Amino acid sequence: MSYLALARKYRPQTFGAVAAQRFVTTTLQNAINMGRVSHAYLFTGPRGVGKTSTARIFAKALNCLSPDGINPCGRCENCLEIVNGTSLDVIEIDGASNRGVDEIRSLREAVKFVPVKSRYKIYIVDEVHMLTKEAFNALLKTLEEPPEFVIFIFATTDQHKLPPTIVSRCQRYEFTKIPYDEMLESIIKILEAENVPFEEDALNLVIRSSEGCMRDALSILDQVIAYTDGNVDMKNTSYLMGVSDKYLADEAFAAVLKEEPDKIPALAAAIDEKGVDYKYAAECLIEHTRNMLFFVTTGDMPYKEYTSAEKEFYTGLKKYASDRRLYALFQIFQKLVSDLKFFEFSRYVFEFALFKAASVSQIIPVAAVPARAQAPAVRDVPLVKTEKVVIGKDAAPIKEIIKEAEKKEALAENVPGSEAVSSGGLWEKALEKISKDPGPFGCNIQYGYLVSAGPDRIVVGFHKDRSFYYDFYNKPDKKARVQEILNSLANPAPRFETVLEDSEDGKKKAPAEVLIQAESYRERQAKKAAREDPVIKAVMEQTGAEIESIDILGNKPES
């Protein structure tokens, strides 16, 4: 007898043997038990998860001569014929090769004949989405009102390609991918039945490659068993699946996270010598970045099917990772994948991306900041960052200086023209209401300034270099909206007018410009406080360090 592939040999023969589809199998069993069997079913879902197998089991259960409760016996004449594909009453049709209107016309004629020796005549149409539009239309009437002894079971991986008129005439059942735990349990039972020794890490690799499809997993195992002469181990499985060179991408990711650019030339040369596809290596780097982000933020790996070596790899690199750095690395590697599609010199593009990724903390402030935990006054507030030391703005000297700066800003010290903004109480109220609009109408007003405010009219000016905003509010509909707001605040309300003025007039500043100057003033004061902070001075005295530069970080520090 010729060898039977694992996927065929261990195909489920009862409802209980179908993995991870309990909703479907339970509903079908209850329908049989209650005598509420429909005339048409639609099984949808990914490949290799049990759609056709469930259809056959359902057909056997309906036509079994001596059922074992709800399940088919698997031994009677009808069950054996269905399993062998020789039954005259259970007809399997390949929708891809019988997709035309002529084949459907023949089916319409055939359904009129009663079953030969079974209770039901069942048509199982696989890949039904491949039927043509004309074929679907020819099937509609028969599908809606078939003879009472006819049942249609459609299976497809692409439900969205089916006409709504077909879907609405069927009971639809969604099949899902098989979870890791259930697939691992099933595979172990199969390998034990076959007396095949295995390593669980190798099975994890197979399951991850199968993407939740049992048939794919068993096909891979068949290939591995044949290659290794009956032993599923990690070394041979990884080689056969083409991931044995993945260690180069692993080493590249480690060099990037540890910021060791000196290792990149040798790694790039090794990748080039072994002929590893650069796009594959870049995708591996993206996968590592994503997995590490899950590990850093949740403390767990995103999936269970990672090998022990992979878990050890991520654990060893965790101390070098932070969510900010991983966000930045993802953008770099994502751009690398895109660039590799459009440039011929792939190696150079790959190398430069690795150098950039390994130096990311020198480009943008994403590095982890362990030193801040030693500053007792630091909280989750913006940081003042130096090349050598990081302290919190919440430290007492800086806090006092910022408060003082805000007082000075309120008095418009070193911010010329701000008195024009604060004049006109009615306009201030109107400005507040306008600014609440989330669109351009609310944002653009910040580039205008109050020229005059009187009982008859309010004049708002715009500099000539801001003529876009002047034109925006000079439109009749925008003027009308501003006037409505003024009318809601005063009765009678002054008339709203706009004016375009010379930008060389340095005495008049728009709110947006005032804010920019105020922010600059705060930054100067914060940097001054950082240099004079006693904690930084003590560190510099003890270590001999010097402040090279100071950057202001507006967001909360990393945790």
Image: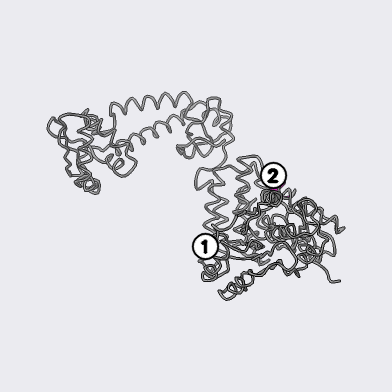
Q: Is residue 481 left or right of residue 71?
A: left
Q: Is residue 112 left or right of residue 220?
A: left
Q: Position of residue 461 (x, y in %)?
A: 19, 40
Q: Where, quadrant-wise, is the C terminus in this rendering?
A: top right
Residue stretch in magenta: 309-316
* Residue 292 x/y as whole percent: 63, 46
Q: Say whether residue 308 is magenta.
A: no
- Secondary structure of the residue carrying numbered label 2: helix
Q: Which mark is residue 316?
A: 2
Is residue 478 toward the left or the right of residue 358 in the image? left
Q: Which comes before the other along the chain, label 1 or label 2?
A: 1
Residue type, numbered disc 2: Gly
Q: Amino acid at mark 1?
A: Pro
Describe the element under mark 1 as helix, strand or loop. loop
The majority secondary structure of the magenta stretch comes to helix
Which one is in front, 203 or 533? 203
As drawn, 120 above or below 36 = below
Residues 291 and 83: in front is 83
Give the residue displayed 64% in from the left and 66% down from the top.
125
Number of labels in the image equals: 2
The residue singled out by tag 1 in the image is 163
Q: Residue furthest left?
A: 456
Q: Is residue 105 above or below residue 381?
A: below
| Residue 136 in view of the camera | yes
Q: Nearer the viewer, mark 1 or mark 2?
A: 1
Point 32% across, 26% down: residue = 408
